[in-house]
Amino acid sequence: MAPKRTTVRDLRRQNRSTLLSTLFFDGPLSRYELSRLSGLSAATVSNVTGELVDDGLVVEAGSVDSDGGRPRVLLRVNPAFAHVVGVDVGETGIKVELFDLALTQLAALDHALSPSSPAAVASLIASSVRDVVAAAGVPASTVLGVGIGVPGTVEQGATAVVHAPTIGWDGVRLEELVASASSSAWPLYVENGAKTQGQAEMWFGAGRGAKHVVIALIGSGVGAAVVTDGGVYRGATSSAGEWGHTTIVYGGRPCRCGALGCLEAYVGAEGILDRYRKARGRELPAGDEQSTVAALIDAAPRSKTAARVLEETAGYLGAGIANLVNLFNPERIVLGGWAGLALGAHQLDRIVAATRAHALRHPYEQISIELGRLGPDAVAVGAATLPVAALLDRAADPRKPSAPELSVELGVPDRRTRAF
Amino acid sequence: MAPKRTTVRDLRRQNRSTLLSTLFFDGPLSRYELSRLSGLSAATVSNVTGELVDDGLVVEAGSVDSDGGRPRVLLRVNPAFAHVVGVDVGETGIKVELFDLALTQLAALDHALSPSSPAAVASLIASSVRDVVAAAGVPASTVLGVGIGVPGTVEQGATAVVHAPTIGWDGVRLEELVASASSSAWPLYVENGAKTQGQAEMWFGAGRGAKHVVIALIGSGVGAAVVTDGGVYRGATSSAGEWGHTTIVYGGRPCRCGALGCLEAYVGAEGILDRYRKARGRELPAGDEQSTVAALIDAAPRSKTAARVLEETAGYLGAGIANLVNLFNPERIVLGGWAGLALGAHQLDRIVAATRAHALRHPYEQISIELGRLGPDAVAVGAATLPVAALLDRAADPRKPSAPELSVELGVPDRRTRAF
DNA sequence: AGACTAATTTTAAGTCGCAAACTAAGGTCC
DNA sequence: GGACCTTAGTTTGCGACTTAAAATTAGTCT
């Protein structure tokens, strides 16, 4: 409630966290390099890493010559220290994957699933998590937590509340449902799927190294994860980033959200196909969205109509991206989601040109537009990062035995910001 | 360059900053209340405030009974400890105002000015600052710094670079120009005017108490200050928040930025009047924009055309606001700028209705839409907060004698301030 | 083996915030 | 008016922390 920031102990925790995070992200490093990178004195690095090694969080990983002196001993995060589970609740099925602490996948499970009651999904999640832990053969006690990415907005609070209209969920307390369907008490972290995917791209994909990034997620619908100052931006109630439902054509096409002229109604797969259908004046061959869009793109070289629809899509998308550029002034825009990748692969030049036409010169000059680098597992990987982020953040403080007050404070990795 | 976070000394600075900021924003407080609010122990509060009092930053301010015990001694920031200057560089003139540390205005100066060369403006700023300090009769040595709000984007870096197309500035290093035109070496802080006005609303106006706010600035043009997690959001190169140039009508009206369909072309004063002109099919009576818009609003009850133009304006504006709501998920939207206030006063219901129609239900339910509370001095007040924010931030560390390495690190000042 | 170099660890300060004990300042009750 | 509360603020003693400097370790080079 208050500014809160205090004691000398926080310092230690902070430094533990800094060092652990540095090791996590910047690979094996010697104590010496850690000292340079963190700004901490060699003595402190030695002291703190010693503790981390004692705790089993960090292990030595060979050494490296240093011309003519004592070789540096490399340290790295111990991948086997703990395991995490990532769950991707999609519109057509759920994926459950288990990773070690380095986010290497050890086991995975896939369930097709037509939209079902929250309770049914929760119980499927609970049993699948159990199964995947068993399949990987890791001791249950090493499981740090379970991250769950869902296709809707997630209101973070004492307990996460999910609103996911596309699968018919409204006000679902998924955390509670899963917890009560599950025998183990692993901490649960529920988050919007676009945000988990964005976090995955930030940690391991096209977002690495940047601090201000927007990761667009274009599939059947359209979403985005906005990364500001290095962290996923959530806003007051965690529903920030609903890019798909920003108005781009005032009074335009109806969107499934009920409003008119949303970006999603133009560049979401459903919107693209619908516009194509109208342009052709007749129905499309049957097939799922994904292959139909692929067919549309294939047809472009031969079909004027297909080409025009794609061209227009690139225009709308560029304008939508320009809005992000003007509002957020990011360094980088990452196009993700299956439709985003498909469009990006064939229309990137046009998209960039349209962005340029709609963005202000100065912020436009700062950005690069790239394609996402992670595959279809990105949402699950990103979900699995949630417990890891919590670990790094609280620096695996041994005094806080790993599963404290549920996911509550996960919200924002509480880096301090500032006013001006 | 690295995560940086260290020493035991930072703790002290941090706590000094927390206490000083708490006193600044939450008025006179006793040590006891400070202890509760900051989470620090009474001992530490006593210790740190003792230091602050010794340094002259804080003074006692009477006492208050505490039923049946020792009365509490109130502490407050010493308004006379330092002074700050705020400069509002507008499109038609500059305002220069001097404040004490509590941001009470002590003197002000106004110069009409047609768009002029940067050097001329810089020299006018330099001399006016000198004049206003002299007029207030405060010793030059107590001037903490000079904040300057400009009507364009400001790229923060080693030195601030201003791009302000509406006054013909492109790549102007205003800081350097003012510094060389000035004999004193007061630290300079250059920032976009919409952002300084936003900061003023956050500190003293409609934004108080909230952490996620968008302060819209609607005048001749359209801008916004986006406050995320309590701080004004700048993005990678400080040009974030260009709301006016987000596309709201794909392929729509040409905007002075060169693109089509920008929000500014519809709800900026110029855009409104131009649409009205077109709707009436003939010229408007002469007059400045501000009075012409007022006349338009007055005419609405009698003129169908005027009413329709305003109604449409509310619609566009609502859609623009909804985009902010969906993307940023703020708690509050503040309408500012003379046109924003005028529209808000007469069309707020319609604007709210349009916002509701375009926003997603969940984030919409979180917001309140309010009018700005500060008058035409807001930009200057906000500019003056910049040196104050720097003071609060570095906690007036006595070791850093108040005017150190020029404003350099103001850019993305690196640390926490406070919940504001 | 001895000299040298560079990475870590140990040692000796010096800082900091906190809990507990203590002092200050006023009120209540008889 | 004095014994006794109550609340605010200060002092003291301590444990925790980081650091600079000195010491140690582990190789390379001759």
Image: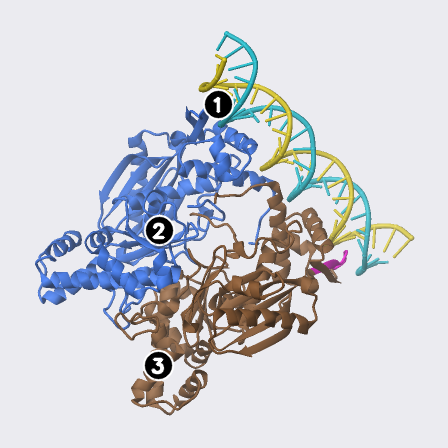
Chain colours: A brown, B blue, C yellow, D cyan
Task: Judge whether B199 appears above or below A123 on screen.
Answer: above
The quarter of the rendered structure image containing the N terminus of chain B is: bottom right
Circle 3 chain: A
Q: CA distance from mark 1 to mark 3?
A: 76 Å
* Mark 1 or mark 2, earlier in chain: 1
In front here: B159 or A291? Answer: A291
**Residue B143 position within the rendered picture, expressed as x and y whole percent measured from the top left:** 39, 35
Question: Is label 1 on the same chain as label 2?
Answer: yes
The secondary structure type at the circle numbered 2 is helix
**Residue A66 position within the rendered picture, expressed as x and y whole percent measured from the top left:** 73, 59
Q: Quickly name the residue at label 1.
A: B70
Q: Residues within 10 Å of mark 1 (few under 14, many from 20)?
A: few
The secondary structure type at the circle numbered 1 is loop
Mark 1 or 3, closer to the camera:
1
Q: Quickly name the residue at label 3.
A: A311
Q: Is residue B7 left or right of residue B398?
A: right
Kind of residue at badge 3 = Glu
Q: Quadrant of residue A239?
A: bottom left
Q: Quickly name the residue at label 2.
A: B195
Kind of residue at badge 2 = Lys
Q: Is residue B209 left or right of residue B19?
A: left
Magenta stretch, residue numbers: A67-75
**Residue A384 position within the rendered picture, expressed as x and y whole percent measured from the top left:** 58, 66
Q: Residues within 10 Å of mark 2 (few under 14, many from 20)?
A: many
The secondary structure type at the circle numbered 3 is helix
Q: CA distance from mark 3 to mark 2?
A: 37 Å
